[in-house]
Image: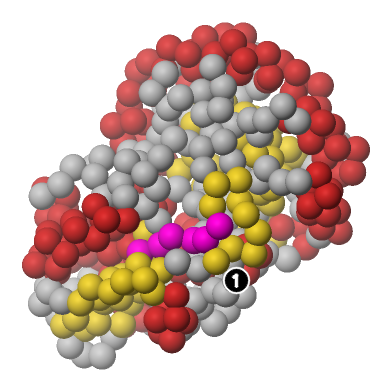
Amino acid sequence: MKISKIKMFYVKIPLVFKFTHSSKERVSSSSLIVKIETDDGYCGYGEGTPRDYVTGESIASSIAFFQDSIIPYLIYYEIENLDSISSILKKIDEITNEQSNPSILCAIELALLDILGKRNNKPISGILFCNRSRAVNYSAVLPILPVDMFTKYLHMVKVKKIRYLKLKVGTDSDIDRLKSAREILGNDINIRVDANEAWDIDEAIDKILAFERYHVSAVEQPIKKSDHNGLEMILRKVSVPLILDESLCNMSDAKLLRENICTDNLIFNIRLSKCGGIFKSLKILDYANKHGVKSMLGCHVGETGILSAAGRHFAQSIDGLLFVEGSYSNLILEEDIINQDLLFGDYGVGVPLVGPGLGVEVLGEKILKYAKGEITS
């Protein structure tokens, strides 16, 4: 089957509340949705979420790359199997580099896998992982919120019996919020924090040492992503593991971190869009496993159900992920663009996806409702 048509939509969906962390304040989602159609009637969807403060890519640069470089390579390309998808992705890699446009590469890859899964009547996890699937334990994530809203959401976490919680930190009220979380939720829940590069080295050490009394399981990205010496200094002073997110966007980052930092107490935060898709994420995960580094699956704020579904397939098929984030679209988006509700249930449990392709029905009318721009081959 040949690719007959390619479209990309720039989609912005309002959030139900302002999502604030140390690097960004967001009131709407910001996604690029790729739709690929074939000459025999199949259609696949993918999503990427460019974040300039993480990967350096912008919506504008991603759109330009897609229009100028991707469409000419993809149009009329023949998709027969997984090898043909790998081949075209490698060709696209040759015209760019792994630091550039990972969100677009992720969106294209997911759309192609969605098509292949539908054609073979298999979920993408079945194509990639031989039908390995299990329920997924998701974390709740709370941004920096006013006290009343923060307390309200903590009680929701308690009612749902969520087992894992991440708190965004980086303000003068960090200790008070952490103390409140422990008082409301008790000591059985696993709580970690994410600073999003908020601190300098000394402040990070002081903060983390103060957090230890509240049994924090890990601290994410305490300082600037490029400060490897600073990360090493922090690791020498504290016992709490560090999660690296902004510092880890691709395989080159993974290798550089391992070469420059003692990895005994590190956790890699793999995000599908940030890392360039499932294939590239699997390579980072494999590298981490071979070198004794633990990993987790993260997500971007405002991901729609397309990336949520891709994350579910990834997480339901992979052993050993310490934490899993995602499937929040029905919690924080005004409206999702898929027909299913992927929100996890009690205890944070998300059921495996088993339908063909991504296993979700994408609603074209919802994409058009929130589209701010469209590119067609």
Callout 1: 10 Å neighbours few (<14), some, many (20+)? Answer: some
Callout 1: SS = loop
Foreground pick, 85 / 211: 211
Res. 222 image quadrant: top right
Q: Look at the image and tell me whether residue 154 can be seen.
A: no
Residue 51 part of the magenta segment: no
Q: Which amino acid is tagged 1?
A: Glu
Left or right: where does residue 291 sit relative to residue 120? right
Q: Quadrant of the C terminus?
A: bottom left
Foreground pick, 120 / 6: 6
In the rendered image, residue 66, in percent from the top left (x then y), is placed at 20, 61
In the rendered image of this protein, does residue 60 appear above or below residue 121? above
Left or right: where does residue 300 sit relative to residue 34? right
Residue that carries the numbered disc 1 in the rendered image: 334
Foreground pick, 163 / 129: 163
Magenta range: 27-33
